[in-house]
Structure formats: structure tokens, C-alpha cells
Image (spheres, rainbow, N blue to C red):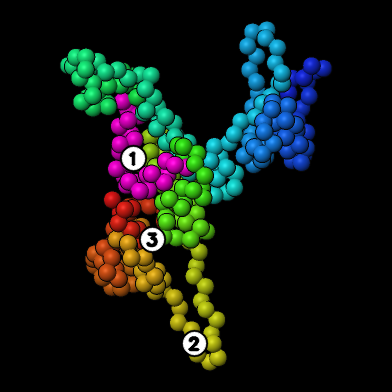
Amino acid sequence: MLDKIKVKARGGQVAFAGTPKRQMEQLLEIAAITGLPEAQRDPEMIASLKVPQIGDAPRVADRTVRRRSRVECLARAGVLEPHEAQACEWYAERVALAWDTTGCTANYEGGGSGGGADAPDRAMAKNQEVSWARDDCREIRAMLGGSMTEAFEAIVCRNESMGATAAGAFPQLGRSAAEERLRTTVKFCANKLHERYSGLMRWLDAPEVKAVPIAKPAPIAAVKAKPVTIVDEIAAAVALRSEGAAALWVSSEVLALLKRTMNRRALETFGGLPVVERPAWRWGYVIVDAAEAV
């Protein structure tokens, strides 16, 4: 935290002020001293970073600024939960490692010079960590699907802007709807990564989602209002689905509730959409289109 950072000044130890307002002022002062253009001094987009001492060389400033990643900004804005941000940062590191060409060679065991063009990328990595990272990337891209992976990597790995990425990923939607869809996509992909790797990586646990009871509508005149069931709720969502809808993903709990409510032993389709059970899934239900249902 900034209020605990000690800045080594020429006259002794000076601590960052404890108030958020003064912290922001000092952050902007550091940005000005280090020569950051004024147009890039948005306090929400930059963070303070200590300048390392290299030998006895003089330093112009004790601290400098760095640009926050798109994942950090989404986490600070409350869009991403801590466990989702952790999964996003891990994936960005795996992608960076997977395509780090400093550990690659065109001459690998079993091949001669000039044969590297036909070699699988895993065989061309000298470093075993690079090979494993590439295996992870291939598995994750197959799990998420092409269109979702492209939008996810644009934000998480390449730090592209939300507006431009949303417009390219969802051109059929308006600006606000496209950006909201992109935020949902990033959260969905992050939760899929957490679901797949959290046990192996000892990541933060996802927060427990408490079921919110559906409020009964107020009665009109003397007519008794009919309570809304889970079947009614999902049926309404399916009726409003887009033309590209391909499947209905449901958690095990929601699937069991649907079967019990509809008095069915098996439920393969609902409203014309194939029903896909997602075991140990924290989401209730989601209607996915063809690209996402891969």
C-alpha cells in the first residue's frame, strides 16, 4: 500500500501521506518529475514504482511510475474478483513465456539445418518450461474456443482498450452492450481457467455465491400473482436468445432443479437448445452461441 511505502529522499526517510488525496497528488508529482506526458497522467492508469539503485550512479528520482495492466484496472474497478484477476495474470505470463523466442532454435534433435520450418513449435523450444507453457496455451485455447480466446487475450495479454476490442469482437452490438459483453467474456474465461487450474496452482478460492430468492411480484388488484419458477426464468431467457445461440449450459444444481420441477428423469434439450451440464460450475445457467460452445 502507498501509505506504507518509504521513499528514500536526500534529507532522510519520507513516508507517503496517508490520505488518498495526498497519495494521488504525490503520484502525479512523481509522474511530472519523471517526464511522463501530461495526457498520460491518469491516476487510475498509473502506479508508483521504486527506482533501483545501480552501483553509485546518481538517480534523478527515487520513484517512477508504470502503467497498470488492463487486468489491474478491471480489478481496481471491481469488474474482476481477486481470483479472476489472479487467473488472468497467470495466463498472461504463460503466453509471454510460450512465445519467448530467446529459447528457440531451428536445429533440434532429429533434424538438420534448414529443417526447422517444418518442426512443431514444442520441438523447437530448448527450454522445457517454454514447451510446457505452449502445451498450456494450446489446451486453454481449445477449451475456450477461437473467438473467446481472441477477445480474452486482447485484454489480458496485449492490454488493448475495451472499446476497440469490444467493437471488433461484437460488431452486431451497440457500444455499451458490446463492452458489457466483453467484460462478461473476460470474467467467464477467467473462471474457466480458475476451474481448470486452481487446484494445481493453489490459487485464491472463488467467493461463495449465495442463492438469492426470487421475489414474488406484487399482486395486481384481486388477482393472485403466480410465483416465478426456475423453468419460467430460463424459458424467458431462451425466448430472447440471439440467432447464434447453440446451447444452454447449466450447473449440476440447476439441472437437478429443472428435472425435479419438470418431472423429467433426463433433460437433453430445453426450448430447442441442447442442455450441457457443467459439473462443479459456480454459474447457474448461460446461453452460449456457436463459437463459445466449442
Q: CA distance from mark 2 to mark 3?
A: 29 Å
At label 1, the amino acid type is: Ile
In the image, what residue occupies the spot 65% across and 14% down?
53
Which stretch did the figure color magenta? 131-155
**94 displayed left or right of 14:** left
Residue at the spot 64% in from the left edge and 42% down from the top edge: 44
Q: Is residue 86 magenta?
A: no
Give the amino acid type for the residue marked by disc 2 in the picture.
Lys
Q: Position of residue 292 (x, y in %)?
A: 33, 53
Report which residue position mark 1 lands on: 140
Q: Mark 1 and mark 3: span between their CA atoms?
A: 22 Å
Does residue 151 belong to the magenta stretch? Answer: yes
**Other residues around mark 2 within 10 Å, as few (<14) / some (14–19) / many (≥20):** few
Residue at the limit of the structure toward the right, as seen here = 11
In the picture of the structure, the residue carrying the numbered disc 2 is 224
Q: Is residue 294 left or right of residue 17?
A: left
In this view, the residue farthest toward the left is 110
Can residue 244 be seen in this snapshot? Answer: yes
Please name the residue shown 28% across and 65% down the image: 273
Which secondary structure dominates the residues rendered in magenta? helix
Residue 82, given in percent of the width and then of the height, sits at 53, 42
Helix, strand or loop at label 2? It is: loop
**Residue beneath disc 3:** 285
Label 1: which secondary element: helix
